[in-house]
Image (cartoon, grey):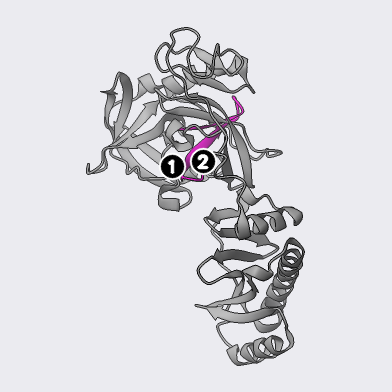
Amino acid sequence: MIIQKTIERFQNAVVQIAIKTGNGTGFYLPSYDLIVTNYHVVREKRQAIIKGRNFDKQLSRVVFTDERHDLAFLMPPNNVNDFPNLRLGDYKLLHAGDTVLAIGHPYGLNYTATQGVISKIDRVQQGVHYIQIDAAINPGNSGGPLVNGRGEVVGVNTFIIRGGDNLGFALPSSYLKEALDLYQPMRGKTVVRCPSCSTLVTEQMRDNERYCPNCGMELHFPKEDAATDLPLSGIAGTIEDILRKLEFNPELVRSGQHRWEITEGSAKVKITYNPDNYFVISDAFLCRLPKSGIGPLYTYLLRENYTMRTELFSLQGDSVVLSALLYDLDLTVERGETMFRNLFRRADFYDSLLIKEYGCLPILVER
């Protein structure tokens, strides 16, 4: 029961973090008002997408990076108060054999907790102490909290040994607390901790573009995406211009190259563009087929298809899908805005109608 309560308590504190090239985990510490993660999760990016159980996707600024200890801090989400008051535990009180939980989002599986024991308290790797654990840590877990039996954060899950059988390593909370305390006087500024002399360097303190003013070590400050990546051009760029006009942030709804995913009301809309077949396809996933009475539903959908000019009902598995199709050479911002706006409006309308009038089931959504 204690483990169950610990997992439930941490679900509102654990944050999903994504950049274009990958994803990981972070956690929010109210006493410092910062999100903690690994440096390798955000690399040298100036901002990342964050999402939590109690807030929607949004952009967050990376304000602190420490390459040597693989730590990074991000600004917290806007206007969210429903966070548990996590506490940092005393790493020195740990013992081999203590039970711990590693919490994160491995392989995109949200809020996964794995239980294990501490194998060794002080495993030294490249001059840094780590807690060795046998709890499974997988891709996506990086940056998540390691939690002791009292529900305290005693480490940051950091890396595994490939090919090892559950050989995981977490950075002790003592390193984390030191970094947090050092950063507090500079809160809000973009800071890099020098991997050589541990000096905290702000962008304003640099003597030049690349080196630590104290020891001369080369530093890697967070930077914007390469100019070659943004903005998009061609049809993909036009689609993102349309999304901006509809008041969506393309960076938040982009799900891959030439792919976007939008939640509108109770429907989930997937927009894809395939340059090989020249079409922009928008699929609104509405609801699932009812357990009975499918005949009247099919009749209704076929009649609606007969009357609609730009949309079409279809089935993908057990999901009812409302789709719109446009030839890429016909796509303009004005035409695309009209098509997407109509699809979003109709998707929300039909989703509610099919559930209420034909007994369709809501799409399963993982919280």
Position of residue 120 measured from the top left corner of the image (x, y, whole percent): 26, 28
Query: Of residues 114 and 182, which is closer to you in this image?
Result: 182
Start and end of the magenta stretch? 15-38
**Labelled disc at residue 54:** none
Q: Secondary structure at mark 1?
A: strand
Q: Is any atom of residue 209 visible in this view?
A: yes
Circle number at residue 10: 2
User: What is the magenta segment's predominant secondary structure?
Assistant: strand
Residue 148 visible in the shown view: no
Res. 103 mark: 1
For image coordinates 48% across by 13% down, the residue present is 212
Q: Are marks 2 and 1 in contact (CB under 8 Å)?
A: yes
Three-letter amino acid code of the residue under disc 2:
Phe
Q: Residue 294 versus residue 42: which sits nearer the camera?
A: 42
Decide whether residue 364 is among the magenta residues.
Answer: no
Q: Is residue 21 left or right of residue 244?
A: left
Badge 2 or badge 1: first in the primary sequence: 2
Under circle 2, the secondary element is helix
